[in-house]
Image (cartoon, rainbow, N blue to C red):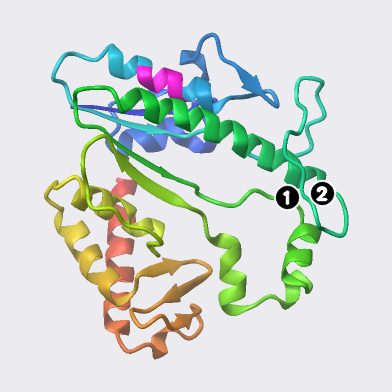
Amino acid sequence: MSVLQCIPRKATNFNRNQVYPRLGFSQFLTEDDFTDVVKIRELCSDQSVYDKMIDLYENKQEGQKLFLYGVTMQNHGGYTYEGEDFTPLVQTVGLNKTYDKVNQYLTCMRYTDEALENLIGYFSDVDEHVMIVMFGDHHGDVGSDFYEELYGKKLIDVEGEQYETRYETPFFIWTNYEIEEKADEKISLNYLSTLAMQTANIPLTEYQSFLAELQSHYPVISAAGIYDAEGNFYTWNNVEESADYSYMKEYQILEYYMLENYKK
């Protein structure tokens, strides 16, 4: 199996050149490996990243398994670009004022939708089984004033579950073969690899098996808050009061152990 990481930025960005080999990636592609790139806001477009991934798939050895982890940059902030080659195609309506950052971000998302349609369209027609997992690692920073209008209050007054919504991002798992269809899954990123493995019918590691058990007690664990199986919301200040906290404590011990191992 070839295991590749693909990001159109410098190799040293966030020390990825040191981190990814420790995570088991056999090859790390950076901006130096991208040619004929189409840029949006002077950043490599999602379509160019997807074209690179398709090229890597087409040039692998026949029958070779391929795991690709791509990080896109097209939609990354800050949303202050005013170049002549970018015109917002999406405009917000019904708000108290015009939010230029929001219009720029949503326009970038439209370009992503078009690129994603092309990517899925390509892999819909290949003979091998293919799984695409797509997720966002954080919201775009489109300005506090926009969020305050949505919330109807100052951000400093946003707490609890309402505060946690600022850290929700969508994800999906798509395959070119039949799988059980699900919607509105509430999950946190620490469980996503386990869900992908389960969906692909690949045996779980012992750690992933533990995560699957943990998920049945705490479906969502994030820096912004925690949900238990009954839908109760906790912060890290009061999660010790939850009924299944012993599982959370064991998780924290395992996390520490895993991080210490990656340092070596």
Magenta-colored span: 50-54
Q: Is residue 39 left or right of residue 214?
A: right
Horizontal and vertical percent position of residue 62:
16, 14
Q: From the image, which quarter does the C terminus lie in? A: top left
Residue under circle 2? 99
Residue 205 visible (yes or no): yes
Q: Is residue 208 left or right of residue 114?
A: left
What residue is rendered at 25% in x and 64% in y? Answer: 211
Assess whether mark 1 and mark 2 are in contact (beta carbons under 8 angstroms). yes
Q: Secondary structure at mark 2?
A: loop
* Three-letter code for the amino acid on which mark 1 is drawn: Val
**113 or 251: nearer the eye?**
113
154 magenta-colored: no
**4 or 46: nearer the eye?**
46
Task: Check disc 2: other Cα within 10 Å, few if <14, some if 14-19, many if 20+.
Answer: some
Horizontal and vertical percent position of residue 66:
24, 27
Cα distance in 3D space between marks 2 and 1: 8 Å
What residue is rendered at 21% in x and 70% in y? Answer: 213
Q: Which badge, 2 or 1, is on the more N-terminal residue? A: 2
Prevailing secondary structure class for the magenta stretch in the rendered image: helix
What residue is rendered at 56% in x and 69% in y? Answer: 164
Q: Is residue 15 left or right of residue 141?
A: left
Horizontal and vertical percent position of residue 190:
36, 58
> Is residue 31 positioned above or below 155 on the image?
above
**114 or 168: nearer the eye?**
114
Residue under circle 1? 142
Q: Secondary structure at mark 1?
A: loop
